[in-house]
């Protein structure tokens, strides 16, 4: 039975099953030339040639060939000159392995053949954590000996595919049945696979925290020179800049946070740089919150945090003058050291902290505890305002400006953090 016949769906599989998604997309490619051309062009731009035997792909080269689109094929005969492996997933994943034929018994999610020239084998993994990269290798069974396999796979993101389809709907050449097909496919995504949507502004995310986090992560990736769910820096006193929902605050605003001196080494670097207190204090005039972030840690694990009632300027002055205290302290010395800080009003040391210290340090084999007198600055974007700004295309620029503002107050070069190709 031809599963790409519009009237022959998988009766035994739920709509959210990935096979149904693959089938729906291939049906669209079969019936919409615009969608097919957009898919091919996306593949072309993502193809990276690795050997001299490989050649660029061009749709014009296949215009006279017969195109065959199939789904769920077990070890089909492949006799074309070239074979290209295509992965469609939800993230821009990296693959360092070369594609090569395998002894495995392959069942391809999709297969597109362009005459005798090119075969595309398609693997659909809507969730990238389910990827098994060996599935990108074609089976040796029924594969012609002289078929040249592209060493690099083409990796496509669903969100980009959906963006392309939405842009197609704006073209005057899209009419009638083809427009209905594209709209129906987008509706299918919205109902059964909404997590694949690009959601390229917060307004579209509604109150769904997972979608908001996904959008925030996209913002981070778009503005940072280096990121891993947060902005990575190369500064000695500050290793990361965080952006995310602060669920502990009412209405969970979007929080932009920089935690200076978050480890003992970072603290030594931070207070050793003699930070300009007047510059830092001026951040409060720009609606930043500044707070002490004193904590103790063991190796790379932060364990217990302490509040402080001391003024920020006094806190900075104290640690700038007492950098020698920022060293490993034996467990037996820790109580007296913390009591000393309490008497000097540097920290608040109450029963809650004592209980935590007992559980996480004194009743354990941990020794040589690190002292981390951090300093945090946080800026809050009320979520509803952030949604409206993002809808207008203004939020990313505002976030960049705040990052610049925060780093400049500490005499740090924002150009080492932010992608300068973005509009300022």
Image (cartoon, rainbow, N blue to C red):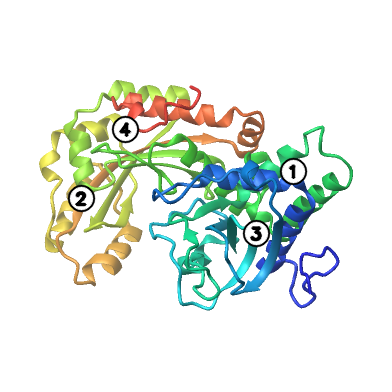
Query: Residue 312, which numbered label?
Result: 4
Front tag of 2 and 1: 1
Neighbour class for label 2 at 10 Å: few (<14), some, many (≥20)? Answer: many
Task: Determine the image quadrant of residue 363.
Answer: bottom left
Q: Secondary structure at mark 3?
A: strand
Residue 68 location in percent, x, y?
Answer: 70, 59
Earlier sequence position, callout 1 versus callout 4:
1
In-image side of 36 versus 294 (left or right): right
Earlier sequence position, callout 4 versus callout 2:
4
Query: Residue 34, which numbered label?
Result: 1
Residue of label 2: 371
Q: Secondary structure at mark 4?
A: helix
Earlier sequence position, callout 2 versus callout 1:
1
Earlier sequence position, callout 3 versus callout 4:
3
Gap between marks 2 and 1, in whole Å? 61 Å
Residue of label 3: 112
In-image side of 49 versus 332 (left or right): right
Which quarter of the figure is the N terminus placed in? Answer: bottom right
Label 1 with label 3: CB-CB less than 8 Å: no
Gap between marks 4 and 2, in whole Å? 18 Å
Q: Say which of 107 and 386 sits in front.
A: 107
């Amino acid at each position: 039975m031809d599963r790409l016949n519009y009237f022959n769906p998988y009766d035994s599989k739920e709509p959210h099953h990935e096979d149904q998604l693959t089938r729906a997309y291939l049906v669209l490619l079969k019936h919409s030339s615009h969608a097919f051309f957009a898919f091919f062009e996306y593949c072309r731009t993502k193809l990276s040639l690795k050997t001299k035997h490989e050649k660029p792909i061009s749709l014009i080269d296949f215009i006279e060939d017969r195109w065959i689109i199939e789904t769920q094929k077990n070890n089909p005969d492949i006799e074309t000159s070239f074979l290209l492996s295509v992965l469609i997933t939800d993230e821009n994943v990296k693959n360092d392995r070369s594609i090569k034929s395998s002894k495995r018994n392959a069942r391809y999610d999709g297969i597109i053949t362009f005459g005798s020239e090119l075969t595309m084998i398609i693997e659909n993994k809507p969730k990238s954590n389910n990827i098994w990269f060996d599935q990108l290798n074609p089976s040796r069974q029924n594969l012609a000996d002289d078929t040249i396999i592209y060493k690099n796979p083409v990796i496509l993101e669903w969100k980009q595919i959906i963006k392309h389809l939405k842009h197609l709907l704006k073209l005057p050449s899209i009419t009638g049945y083809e427009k209905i097909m594209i709209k129906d496919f987008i509706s299918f995504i919205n109902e059964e696979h909404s997590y694949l949507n690009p959601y390229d502004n917060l307004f579209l995310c509604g109150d769904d925290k997972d979608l908001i986090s996904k959008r925030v992560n996209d913002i981070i990736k778009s503005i940072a020179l280096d990121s891993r769910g947060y902005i990575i820096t190369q500064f000695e006193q500050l290793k990361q800049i965080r952006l995310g929902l602060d669920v502990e605050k009412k209405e969970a605003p979007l929080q932009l946070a920089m935690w200076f001196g978050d480890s003992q080494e970072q603290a030594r670097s931070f207070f050793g740089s003699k930070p300009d207190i007047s510059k830092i204090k001026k951040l409060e005039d720009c609606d930043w919150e500044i707070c002490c972030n004193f904590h103790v840690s063991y190796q790379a694990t932060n364990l217990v945090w302490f509040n402080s009632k001391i003024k920020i300027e006094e806190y900075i002055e104290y640690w700038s003058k007492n950098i020698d205290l920022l060293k490993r302290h034996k467990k037996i010395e820790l109580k007296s050291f913390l009591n000393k800080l309490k008497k000097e009003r540097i920290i608040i040391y109450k029963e809650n902290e004592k209980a935590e210290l007992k559980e996480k340090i004194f009743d354990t084999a941990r020794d040589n505890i690190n002292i981390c007198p951090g300093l945090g600055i946080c800026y809050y974007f009320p979520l509803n305002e952030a949604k409206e700004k993002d809808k207008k295309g203004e939020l990313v620029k505002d976030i960049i400006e705040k990052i610049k503002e925060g780093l400049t107050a500490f005499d740090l070069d924002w150009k080492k953090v932010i992608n300068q190709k973005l509009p300022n």
